[in-house]
Image: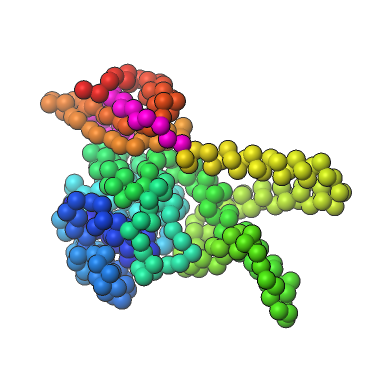
Amino acid sequence: MRIAVLGLGLIGGSISLASHASVAAAEVAGYDVEPVAVQAALGRGAIDRAASSVPDALAGADACFCCAPVGALPELVTEALAAAGPDCVVSDVGSVKRVIAASSADPRFVPGHPVAGAETAGIEHARADLFDGATWYLTPGSEASGVLYERLHRLLVGLGSSPVAIDPETHDRLLAAVSHLPHVLANVLVSRVAGLVDGEGLPRVGPSFRDATRVAGANPAIWGDIYAANGPAIAAEVDAAAARLTEVADALRAGDAEAIAAWGRAARSDRARVLATEGAEGPVHELRIVVPNRPGIVAEVALALGRAGVNIADMALAPASDMSSGAITLSVAGDATAARARELIEELGFPVGAPV
């Protein structure tokens, strides 16, 4: 498989390394506006060929990943689609999806976002195992090609991730809470402590402070774009967090021991519930459905399952001989999850049969 990677930082470099580690006969062409990044990628063996331009990187590519700061993605995606062949799937890795919504009308474009990364940046920190076990969100448009969606899904599974389909608006609201807000809070917390000890020796900090502020000040160029692009959703989460903090402060001022204890118990329970699905597994069930051959049908099924938290472990498409319909075979882990997937698919009007 020929893969084009546009942008050779932490994520682009890790995609390149993971592709060589897990994709059979992968050939990776890399392009970056910074020549030093291209040379570093060559030196690490992340890419097989240094491309001189976006069209050069896309020549003969089966898949393309646009790996740039959020603010640069619309232009880069447009350029990639202009250079991509009719059978090349183009995706991106931005953590805000509404900014590229206009490109989603192209059937070759399947927006994505790997929930993986680090406080470090650059090709020198790229790792082949960065995506192992990571959720990789996909936000396909209504015109997305089913064949290309399947190709991308299989490629992402091969990189070690778990692809999950979700609509762009839900994605941006969710990421504002689980990713963007923690960065905001880390920045505020570390600056607050630094202000308290201004002019004095810094205190010895414990693991709680280190863990809570690990992402403070993360790559300002990247995160400045994220804050700007997803500002309203992040602001809403900041307001909600501030309101809850005010409630906690009121309880502390009042010395309300019961309210404080209940707050702690609720937080413990909520954390267990939120993280419970990360380790959820079980026997793999195969569900086979026959669907009409129309644009966006695979995205429709994937989004319906993604909204309900059903992870598709694998996917295979088989078109009918007359191309009027096709069979989708989905692999889903867990008895209860498979039952829920069957129910959701049948609600869409597609009966579920056993694989043949």
Q: In the image, is 330 to the left or to the right of 116?
A: left
Q: Is residue 298 magenta?
A: yes
Residue 231 seen from this side: no
Q: Residue at the location (38% across, 23% down)?
A: 342
In the shown orientation, is residue 278 left or right of residue 342? right
Taking the spot 20% from the left edge, 65% from the top edge, the residue there is 48
- Residue plotted at (38% across, 56% down): 130
Res 200 → quadrant: bottom right
Q: Is residue 18 magenta?
A: no
User: How far across and how far down the image is residue 103, in percent?
Assistant: 34, 49
Left or right of 56 on screen, residue 216: right
Colouring of the image? rainbow
Count how many numbered circles sit on residues in the image. 0
Q: Which residues are magenta?
A: 280-301
Q: Quadrant of residue 263?
A: top right
Work out whether 257 lies above or below 125: above
The percent position of residue 340, horizontal first and vertical second, equals 43, 25
Q: Position of residue 134 (x, y in %)?
A: 41, 49
Percent across and percent down for residue 206 are: 65, 64
**Position of the C terminus by quadrant:** top left
Residue occupying image coordinates x 61% and y 53%: 235
Q: Nearer the viewer, residue 30 or 292?
A: 30
Q: Is residue 249 visible to us here?
A: yes
